[in-house]
Image: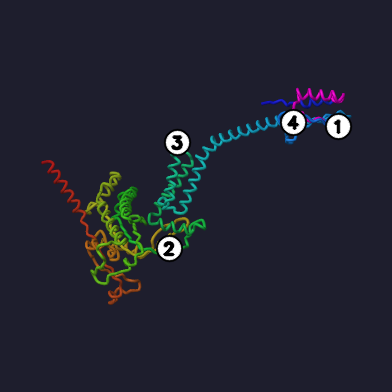
Amino acid sequence: TYREVDDSPVRTMVMLHSQTAVSDEFKDVAISAARKTATPFLFSYVDATGNVTYYGLNTIRPENLRESEILEINITDGSSNTLGTFSYEERARDQALVRLISTIFIIFIWLFGVNSFAGPVMTLVVVPIERMVRLLSMLMRDPLGYQTTDRYKRFVDDEEDFLQTTTWSKDVLKGMETNFLMSTILRIGSLMKVGFGAAGVEIIRNNLAKGESKGGLVLNTQGTTVQCIFLFCDIRQFTDATESLQEEVFVFTNKIASVIHSICNSYGGSANKNVGDAFLMSWLLSDEKSEGGATRRRSSFGARNSRGPNRLTRSQIKADSALLAVIKISIALYYDKFFLEDMTETKRGRLMKKISNRMGPVVQMGFGLHCGKAVQGAIGTQRKLDATYVSDAVEFAEFLESSTKKFKVNMLMSDAFEDLLSPQVQRRCRKVDQILILEDDMDPDDPDLVEIAEKVDLYTYDMDIDELWRHRARTRAAALRFGGS
């Protein structure tokens, strides 16, 4: 608002300058009249002769006034000067009150603006960016297994609390670009986990941890030696399936992979490698020197170890789980409808025609189980990286699988793996043969080869799954007959 400047003290001093020069009596009357009307705050006056006259104030002592509360007006006409001193305390107090109210009003407007504009910025921009930074830090530390950490669980709990306390609707929050970025980061983490596999989680995590200080991957580090159970499985007549299904062979293969990976995962295994028609699974064993594992070989055909039958070790449980996973997979392969339902009629007909001369289910596989040491690590460059195991044990598991065709069985296991099984399961395993492992410098015609070569006993686990299905069919037919009668 406009406020006119009060010029009463100046006008009064001009009038007193001419009136106080007449006489002292007239000066006193003029000043007294001025103090009673226009300038009640005049408390000191110096006339033209230099005489100083002091006057009292009603509200405050003049000596207690601050410098900012005193107003001095000097009037001169060339020959004489007069000086009047006024108390500016009341006006200064009014101005301070106005300034205080103005400051409070500005603060209120500022707080309102912060709440109206900075609040949404915090909710929709700053907080999501902070959450993305937290998620990225977890991805940097553990890009594949971060979802199983306590830190990520707290992160999810904070997200739920944020959604419950915020005044913004979920639709608004989901429509923000920051939410799209968050979803993209989560998908990248999921794709990395799928790409490297469950068995590659620890390998990549350790590699990234070594290179964290350098800001990237370190590919010139040594691998680590681990003790594992390896399962190598291969799809029979995959070439015929590829020729029949062509582009639909991926659907067919992924159906089989889903069965293998899900069953092995439920029994503690990890998917490591998919090679077209073959799959490599692994079970990581703890370092139990007392159990021996793959380092112990039986010297005599059919010899047994002498472990106690009552208590199972962790390695025995994992070995039993690996064998049980193979049995469950073999049973699941008989569900032909699951593997054929997503094929087109033409491709399904071609496949069935190709395998019409073969007995058994549509999907048939061979399995090789072996236990041994392996070196795990990351192989590749910054352009392409694979987490894998490098070992003779992996190759021997593949050899066992390929040998199932020769021995006409679905599964072969080495004595190293059979040694890990619990005694109850060992009694159900059948010995198939004993083979010699030849080194590169050994002569196959050497008469002493049997004595110097390493001997490996081969075992299988006999399964008559066809009889299981025939039993179910007979039971179903009997139930129908009973219901019909």
| Residue bearing mark 1 | 50
Contact? badges 4 and 3 (CB < 8 Å)? no
User: Is any part of residue 368 visible from this angle?
Assistant: no
Crowd rating for badge 1 (residues with CA inside 10 Å; few <14, some 14–19, many 20+): few
Choose between 250 and 393: the one closer to the eye.
393
| Residue 30 colored in magenta in the image | yes
| Residue bearing mark 4 | 87
Task: Give the distance between the C-alpha atoms of the residues marked 2 and 4, in whole angstroms.
Answer: 90 Å
Crowd rating for badge 4 (residues with CA inside 10 Å; few <14, some 14–19, many 20+): many
Residue at point 33% right, 56% down?
269
Image position, residue 194 (x, y; %): 39, 51
Choose between 430 and 178: the one closer to the eye.
178
Residue type at mark 4: give it.
Ser
Residue type at mark 1: give it.
Gly
Task: Give the distance between the C-alpha atoms of the residues marked 4 and 3, in whole angstroms.
Answer: 61 Å
Nearer the observer: mark 1 or 3; the answer is 1
Residue type at mark 3: give it.
Ser
| Residue bearing mark 3 | 169
Image position, residue 236 (x, y; %): 28, 56
| Residue 328 colored in magenta in the image | no
User: Sequence-wise, which precedes: disc 3 or disc 2?
Assistant: 3
Nearer the observer: mark 2 or 1; the answer is 1
Q: Helix, strand or loop at disc 1? A: loop
Task: Give the distance between the C-alpha atoms of the residues marked 2 and 1, in whole angstroms.
Answer: 104 Å
Residue at point 22% right, 63% down?
427
User: Sequence-wise, which precedes: disc 2 or disc 1?
Assistant: 1
Q: In the displayed structure, would residue 280 be above or below residue 433?
A: above
> Quick check: 77 left or right of 259?
right
> Quick check: 19 left or right of 176?
right
Range of the magenta residues? 19-45
| Residue bearing mark 2 | 223
